[in-house]
Amino acid sequence: MDWQLLGISFFTVFLAEIGDKSQLAAIALGGSSAHPRNVFLGTVTALVLASLLGILAGEGVAQIFPAQLVKSIAALGFMIMAIRLLWSSFSSENANSAD
């Protein structure tokens, strides 16, 4: 077993999920439910299934395209999202200062 890959995967997903909408939904459901154990089992199952689907999709894409191309496309996608977030942030700041 590749322990380094296991650790990197764990910390990446763990950090990405902190404060995520799914965690907030789990907090709301757990706080309002008489059966928090069922909420825990449901959220764990959902995260495992979503991760499994992502891994299977990634494995399929890796068999079709070279790894460097997939990494480049992912980097480009993240760059586009960052630019859009920054653009909307600056646009909303300018709109607020004009009021």
Image (tube, rainbow, N blue to C red):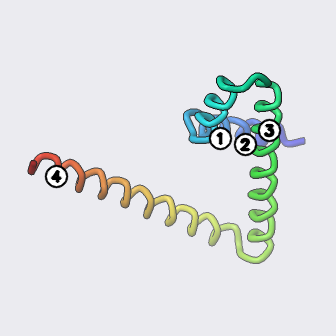
Task: Measure the C-alpha gap from mark 2 to mark 4.
Answer: 39 Å
**Residue 9 bears which disc, if any?**
2
Q: Which circle marks residue 12 in the picture?
A: 1
Closer to the chain start, of discs 3 and 4, is 3
Between marks 3 and 2 in the image, the one whose residue lies nearer the viewer: 3
Numbered marks: total: 4
Q: Which residue is mark 3?
A: 42
Q: What secondary structure is found at the residue carrying circle 3?
A: helix
The amino acid marked with disc number 4 is: Asn
- CB atoms of marks 1 and 2 within 8 Å: yes
Distance CA(mark 1)–CA(mark 2):
5 Å
- In x, y percent, where is residue 89? 29, 51
Percent coordinates x, y for residue 14 in the rendering: 66, 35
- Depth check, mark 1 against mark 4: the one in front is 4
Nearer-the-camera pick, 10 or 88: 88
- Tell me if mark 3 has few (under 14), some (14-19) or many (20+) residues whose alpha carbon lies within 10 angstroms of its own: few
Which residue appears at 82% of the width and 31% of the height? 38
The first of marks 3 and 2 along the sequence is 2
Mark 4 lies on residue: 94
On screen, residue 95 versus residue 66, left or right, reads left
At 75% from the left and 52% from the top, the residue drawn is 50
Crowding at label 4, few (<14), some or many (≥20) Cα neighbours within 10 Å? few
Tag 2 and tag 4, C-beta contact below 8 Å: no
At label 1, the amino acid type is Thr
The part of the image, by quadrant, that contains residue 24 is: top right
The answer for how far apart the CA atoms under marks 1 and 4 are is 34 Å
Helix, strand or loop under label 1: helix
Q: Nearer the viewer, residue 29 or 60?
A: 29
